[in-house]
C-alpha cells in the first residue's frame, strides 16, 4: 500500500458563503408619457384601502358583511399635512366617523370627517421581482367629491378610481424625487423611520 508522501496536505473543500438576502424594495417610480402629463396629473401612487382589522372582526361577529378592499390612485400631495381618503371611498367601506378635524386650504377653512382606515402601499422591484408592502392603520381626513374633482385627469388606467391623497404624515418617512423635465417621480421610504 502506498503511503502518502510527507509534506503533502489534504485539500479542504471551500465552504460556500451563505447567500445574502436582498433587502425588500422600498422605492417605486412612476414614468409619465411626457412632462406635460405629469404637470397636469401630478405624482400618483397605487394603494389599497380597507376596513381596519378590529372593526372587520367586530362586523363579522355581528354577522355583517365586510366591504371588500378598494384599490386606486392616491395623489402624492406635499401640501396636505395628513393623508386623506375620498368621502365616496369611506362611504363604500362603511367607515365610521371617529372625529372631525379642521383644515385650511385654497378655499379657506374646512371641517372634515376623520375615518379609521387600513392603508397598504405595494412596492415591486421590476428587476428582482421582489415585492414589499408598507401598511398601517391610519386616521384619514375625508375629502368630499375627491374623485369628481380629479375625474378630468387622464390617468394611466381610467378604470382605477382616485381614492385619496398621501400627505406629509406619511411622506415624512420618505424621500420624494420629482423630475419634472423627465416626467418621472420616485418615492423611496426609509423603513427604519417607521420605528421611531
Image (cartoon, grey):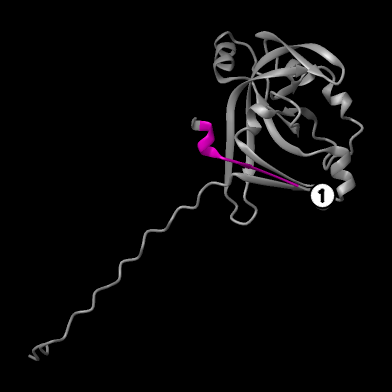
Q: Residue 178: where, in percent of width, then height?
A: 75, 45
Specify whether residue 130 is in view: yes
33 horizontally vs 84: left or right: right
Say which residue appears at 27% left-offset and 72% top-offset: 13
When the figure is inspected, residue 55 is found, relative to residue 32, above or below; the finding is: above
Decide whether residue 80 is among the magenta residues: no
| Residue 150 location, quadrant | top right
* Residue 71 found in image quarter: top right
Residue placed most toward the observer, 190 or 85? 190
Answer with left or right where residue 12 lies relative to residue 158.
left
Q: Residue at x 86, y 48 (%)?
A: 35
The quarter of the image holding the N terminus is bottom left
Between 195 and 136, the residue placed more toward the observer is: 195
**Secondary element type, mark 1:** loop
Whether residue 188 is in magenta: the answer is: yes
Q: Residues within 10 Å of mark 1 (few under 14, many from 20)?
A: some
The answer to which quarter of the image holds residue 83 is top right
- Is 102 rendered above or below residue 51? above
Residue 120 image position (x, y, % from top left): 63, 32
Q: Is residue 170 above or below residue 157?
A: above
Q: Position of residue 7 (x, y in %)?
A: 13, 87
Q: In front here: 64 or 177? A: 177
Q: How many numbered marks does the figure carry?
A: 1
Q: Residue at x 60, y 35 (%)?
A: 173
List x then y, in percent, for residue 76: 74, 34
Q: Which stretch is magenta?
A: 185-194
- In the drawing, does residue 2 fall left or right of residue 128? left
Q: Is residue 97 visible?
A: no
The residue furthest right is 152
Question: What residue does disc 1 label?
Answer: 183
Amino acid at each position: 500500500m502506498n503511503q502518502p508522501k510527507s509534506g503533502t496536505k489534504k485539500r479542504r473543500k471551500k465552504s460556500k458563503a451563505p447567500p445574502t438576502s436582498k433587502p425588500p424594495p422600498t422605492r417605486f417610480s412612476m414614468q409619465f408619457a411626457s412632462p406635460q402629463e405629469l404637470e397636469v396629473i401630478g405624482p400618483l401612487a397605487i394603494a389599497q384601502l380597507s376596513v381596519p382589522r378590529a372593526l372587520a372582526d367586530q362586523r363579522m361577529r355581528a354577522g355583517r358583511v365586510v366591504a371588500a378592499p378598494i384599490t386606486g390612485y392616491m395623489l402624492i400631495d406635499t401640501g396636505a399635512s395628513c393623508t386623506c381618503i375620498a368621502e365616496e371611498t369611506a362611504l363604500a367601506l362603511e367607515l365610521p366617523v371617529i372625529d372631525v378635524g379642521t383644515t385650511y386650504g385654497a378655499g379657506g377653512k374646512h371641517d372634515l370627517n376623520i375615518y379609521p382606515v387600513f392603508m397598504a402601499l405595494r412596492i415591486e422591484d421590476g428587476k428582482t421581482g421582489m415585492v414589499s408592502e408598507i401598511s398601517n392603520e391610519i386616521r384619514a381626513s375625508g375629502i368630499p367629491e375627491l374623485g369628481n374633482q380629479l375625474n378630468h385627469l387622464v390617468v394611466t388606467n381610467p378604470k382605477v378610481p382616485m381614492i385619496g391623497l398621501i400627505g406629509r404624515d406619511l411622506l415624512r418617512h420618505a424621500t420624494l424625487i420629482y423630475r419634472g423635465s423627465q416626467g418621472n417621480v420616485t418615492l423611496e421610504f426609509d423603513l427604519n423611520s417607521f420605528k421611531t
